[in-house]
Image (cartoon, helix red, strand yellow):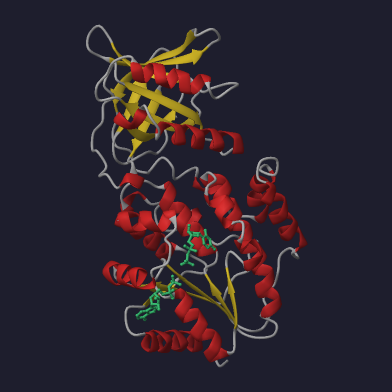
Amino acid sequence: APPAGASGQCFAAEGPGPDLVCFTLSASSSGRPEPRCFVPAPGRCYSLCVPAAPSVPAARLHRRLQQRLRQEPFGRCQVLGLLCYGAQAALEKGFLIQDPQGGPETERALEELLRGLGELPPPLGVYEAGERGELWQCLWALRGAGGRELLHRARVVAAEEPPLHPAVPGLRHAAVFHSLEAARSVVEQCTSFIPEATAVLDLVDKCPKHSKKGEFPVIVIEGLDATGKTTVTQSIKNSLNALLLRSPPACVSQWRKTFDVEPTLIRRAFYALGNYIVASEIAKASTESPVVVDRYWHSTAAYAIATEISGKVQNLPPTHHEVYQWPEDLLKPDLVLLLTVSPEERIRRLQGRGLEKTEEETELEANSLFRQKVEESYKRMENPGCQEVDASPSREEVLRTVLYLIKKHCGSL
Ligand SMILES: Nc1ncnc2c1ncn2[C@@H]1O[C@H](COP(=O)(O)OP(=O)(O)O)[C@@H](O)[C@H]1O
Ligand SMILES: Nc1ccn([C@H]2C[C@H](O)[C@@H](COP(=O)(O)OP(=O)(O)O)O2)c(=O)n1
């Protein structure tokens, strides 16, 4: 069955055999606006897809294809993200490649790319015009000695814009982990090619399972970069004699660079495990003093959702969706405050600080849509939800507000 699907453009292919439904997703990273309607042009349009079901090999293959498609000779092509239901009715994820000039070079280069991948390359989708001007998608399996075999031919027809973004149903398995075990098993599959994965797992396994909070309050400060989390958490620490922790914790932060370049599945599993390690630190510390935490699970979930859901804010999973629920096996804080500032003030603060920006932060600036999606996801979090604090006033005033909210919520300290 076709998924509850995408906004932006989508098209469906019908043919002998099961229907094929494809959704092209906007190229959010380039900041280009979402095209409203897209029909693959015959003779100039191709697709490459891997299974969308979360698996470490498929995620890595997807990443490899993405990297190769950014290189020459594909510079002249428009490359869009693609989610589609393939011949076996299994959801697939990949790319739609449109060559504005046409000609055989792009198809040849794609074949070469696939042959260079080694065993079992994904099939090459080629769009062709039929006799009456209709559009077909042909899936070709590449064979030895330059040969290829037609696997499937399906007719492409326009489809209604579906009510839900097609990446929504898979979010809980591909990007937002709701249990230690789910995140752990992904990182475990990486030990053969990421040596640091073993070290992360060792740390996780040393932590007591199902850590319980002590009697002192635990306050989490969330927000986009440069909203003042470091400033506020430091001040809370001084004002309340609290212990300051952050997620990911210091013991794994040296491996962030390694995991940040891995596909979403692996990267988000790493951050998820970081939260479980911090949970055991919180459990211990909160028996002795108040604890303030700079970023925690809400950051992990909000950034993951905003990266996976392309296009506009309306594409986010609806409020009360399961992705916004706190994982049952993760220690819950008493209070979560979400710092928000206007986009202009945030950019002033980022520039004032002058630190090196992460790739994601550069994207944040280039793409205010992404920033809006992170913030909106934060606001939809539940159980515990995030209480919003306007962090635009002076440092002193923001601290006063924050201390007032802590006192109101957590009683005398
Ligand atoms: N209330 C405030 N008013 C003005 N500037 C602030 C305020 N809070 C923080 N800053 C400045 O903004 C920059 C980003 O703050 P920081 O605490 O590092 O944010 P984050 O930890 O959320 O990235 C820093 O240069 C900081 O000194
Ligand atoms: N608990 C956490 C903390 C950060 N992350 C991810 C989310 C974003 O991709 C980055 C943001 O972290 P970054 O270090 O840039 O943020 P700050 O500088 O602390 O504001 O890390 C996470 O997934 N889970």
Question: Does 362 sit above or below residue 28?
Answer: below
Q: Residue at x 77, y 62 (%)?
A: 206
When the figure is inspected, residue 328 is found, relative to residue 131, above or below; the finding is below
Residue 171: image x %, image y %? 49, 47
Name the residue nearer the viewer: 155 or 319: 155
Q: Quadrant of residue 21?
A: top left
**In the foreground, 207 or 365:** 365
Residue 18 can be seen in this image = no
Q: Is residue 167 left or right of residue 97?
A: right
Figure quadrant of the C terminus: bottom right
User: Is residue 36 depicted above or below 278 in this figure?
Assistant: above
Q: Residue 78's x, y, as percent?
A: 30, 32
Which residue is depicted at the point 70% across and 44% down? 191
Q: Count every numbered label the image shows and give the total.
A: 0
| Residue at the image point whose x is 50% and y is 37% from the top | 63
Left or right of residue 117: residue 13: left
Q: Is residue 111 left or right of residue 343?
A: right
- Determine if residue 267 is in view: yes
Q: Nearer the viewer, residue 406 or 141?
A: 141
Q: The N terminus lies in which quarter of the figure?
A: top left
Please tell me which residue lies in front, 64 or 237: 64
Kindly identify the residue that appears in the image at 32 percent across and 45 percent down.
Answer: 30
Residue 98, x across and y down, in percent: 31, 26
- Quarter of the displayed picture in which ligand 1 can be seen: bottom left
